[in-house]
Image: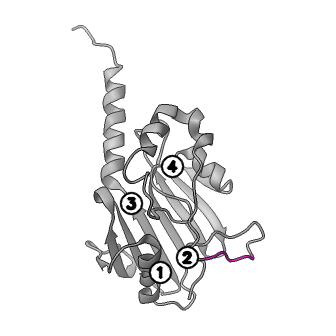
Amino acid sequence: MCKSMFSRPSQSRGTITSLLLVFSISTSFAQNDDSDFVKNRNSSPFWHNSLKRDIQGFRPGLTESEVKHQMPSCEVSAHKFQCPVSSGEHFELSLTEQTKPRLVKDVTYIFPAGGATSETMAKNVMAQFAVGKPGQCLPSPQGLNECSQWQFEDGSYMQLAVGLYRSEMVLYLSTPKWIADLEKQTFETEQGKIPPRKF
């Protein structure tokens, strides 16, 4: 079984923590970004959830500063964070374009399969995220095989797939409806600040 799937490596990268470890995320360091936003975000059903809804502490809605605080090795390029963990293991975090501060839109975790089957990893997901049996990914992600999908609250979902050469697996977490609503609200707020033009 691949034990690196949801465990956080220590600074030495030699210690494997428990698969069932749930990470709590402190938002106190994000207050400088936008305290009103953080307050509203923390009260949302997806964010304020007693069930596990993160991958090693990463989840949609994190601000840029929260990501850097959590994993200083993360580097941002355009609208995406690249976060190396160890050889063959890393995170890709896409960012919003409209919100201030910018937020994580979705989380992609690529990790070595370690000989585990997709069925074994699916059982890990069901146990840790308190979800039932998955359905098929529709449409299936390009370049990936054996894709399973779980529906969460408010349109959010998680996908688990096997890489093309079966040496790696991909776990994907997204909340498209919630993030789209936040971007729309931000856009409308910014538009409202533009003074009227006389013609």
| 89, above or below 163, in the image | above
Q: Are marks 2 and 1 in contact (CB under 8 Å)?
A: yes
User: What separation in Å lies between label 4 and label 2 (alpha carbons)?
Assistant: 20 Å
Q: Determine the residue positioned at 57% across, 57% down.
A: 24
**Mark 1 neighbour density, 10 Å: few (under 14) some (14–19) many (20 or more):** some
Q: Position of residue 118 (x, y in %)?
A: 43, 86
Query: Which amino acid type corresponds to the residue marked 2 in the rendered image?
Result: Met
Q: Is residue 188 left or right of residue 28?
A: left
User: What separation in Å lies between label 1 and label 3 (alpha carbons)?
Assistant: 18 Å
- Dot 3 or dot 4, earlier in sequence: 4
**Mark 3 neighbour density, 10 Å: few (under 14) some (14–19) many (20 or more):** many
Q: Are marks 3 and 2 in contact (CB under 8 Å)?
A: no
- 70, 126: nearer the viewer: 126
Q: Determine the residue positioned at 60% across, 82% down.
A: 3
User: What separation in Å lies between label 3 and label 2 (alpha carbons)?
Assistant: 17 Å
Query: Which amino acid type corresponds to the residue marked 3 in the rendered image?
Result: Ser
**Mark 4 neighbour density, 10 Å: few (under 14) some (14–19) many (20 or more):** many
Circle nearer the viewer, 1 or 4: 1
Task: Identify the disc placed on residue 124.
Answer: 1
Look at the image and say whether residue 17 sits in the magenta stretch: yes
Q: Position of residue 159 (x, y in %)?
A: 38, 72
- Magenta residue span: 14-18
Local secondary structure at mark 1: helix
Local secondary structure at mark 4: loop
Task: Identify the disc placed on residue 174.
Answer: 3
Query: Which amino acid type corresponds to the residue marked 1 in the rendered image?
Result: Asn
